[in-house]
Amino acid sequence: MFPLHDINRSHRRPYMVYLLVVLNLLGFVYTFFLTDPAAVIGAYGFVPARFASDPFGEWITIFSSMFLHGSIMHILGNLWFLWVFGDNIEDRLGHGRFVLFYFLGGTVAAVAQGLVGGFAGEVPMIGASGAISAVLGAYIVLYPRALILSLVGWFPIPVPAILYLGYWLLIQFVGNFLGEPGIAFWAHIGGFVAGVVLIRWFARP
């Protein structure tokens, strides 16, 4: 299933979602068109082993890694999910709290992936998917009955958010079990759980 859009109108423009989309696109252009991709990813990606040995020197990579992506499909997939689900979360939290929630969720996601590997991984972790997973976790709590118009095969079908996002979470566990390379599944799972937990405080009046 691929989400086309949610049938859940927001009441104000999601300016922070717009900003995050632009910053991620700029990060992608800079990485692949203006400099050496391997050098940028190596310097600004989150490397668990390097973080464990020097957390005060490497903490910034938790945030810089959220604006780096490895391919056009990687960034387009992440930004599409942010576009579909992010506006309602920003609408509910307000612009400032949404940004704080986003980065806190992304931080938990990075730490979760590091913990699973015992902070021994040497491969840079990049991508906004951990933070966006927190947005998905918030969405399933706040709008479980909202309909997600999803492409199932070739047919657009409205699917309740609790089913769509539950299916998405299941895919992360299955992908991790199958050992698909190059995907930080525990960052997705950790970010999602963080979103489910944190939104209960962030969404309070």
Image: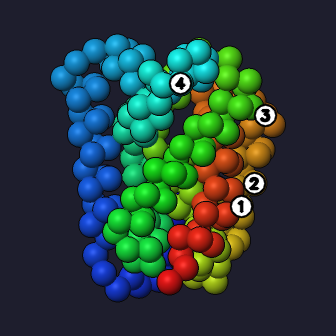
Disc 4 to disc 1: CB gap under 8 Å? no
* Kind of element beneath mark 4: helix
* Mark 2 lies on residue: 170
Q: CA separation, marks 4 and 2?
A: 32 Å
Q: Amino acid at mark 3?
A: Leu
Between residues 56 and 145, which one lies in front from this camera angle? 56
For marks 4 and 1, the one nearer the N-term is: 4
Q: Label 2: how many residues lie within 10 Å, few (<14), some (14-19) or many (20+)?
A: few
Three-letter code, disc 2: Leu
Three-letter amino acid code of the residue under disc 4: Pro
Dot placed on the residue nearer the N-terminal end, 4 or 2: 4
Q: How many marks?
A: 4
Amino acid on which disc 1 is placed: Tyr
* Residue 137 sits above or below residue 6 on the image: above
Q: Which of the marked residues, 3 or 4, is nearer the chain's N terminus? A: 4
Q: Which residue is mark 4?
A: 55
Name the residue: 28% across, 26% down.
31
Residue 133 place in picture, x, y as percent: 57, 54
Look at the image and tell me whether residue 91 can be seen: yes
Q: Which residue is mark 3?
A: 178
Give the quarter of the image for residue 181. Answer: top right
Q: Name the residue nearer the viewer: 86 or 60.
A: 60
User: Which residue is denoted by mark 1 in the rendering?
Assistant: 167
Per the model, the C-alpha gap separating discs 2 and 1 is: 5 Å
- Place of residue 135 in the rendered image (x, y in percent of width and height, measured from the top left): 53, 61
Query: If you read the primary sequence from the N terminus, does the residue marked by circle 2 or circle 3 appear first?
Result: 2
User: Where in the figure is residue 106, as x and y percent of width and height?
Assistant: 52, 46
Locate residue 111 relative to residue 20 in the image: left or right. right
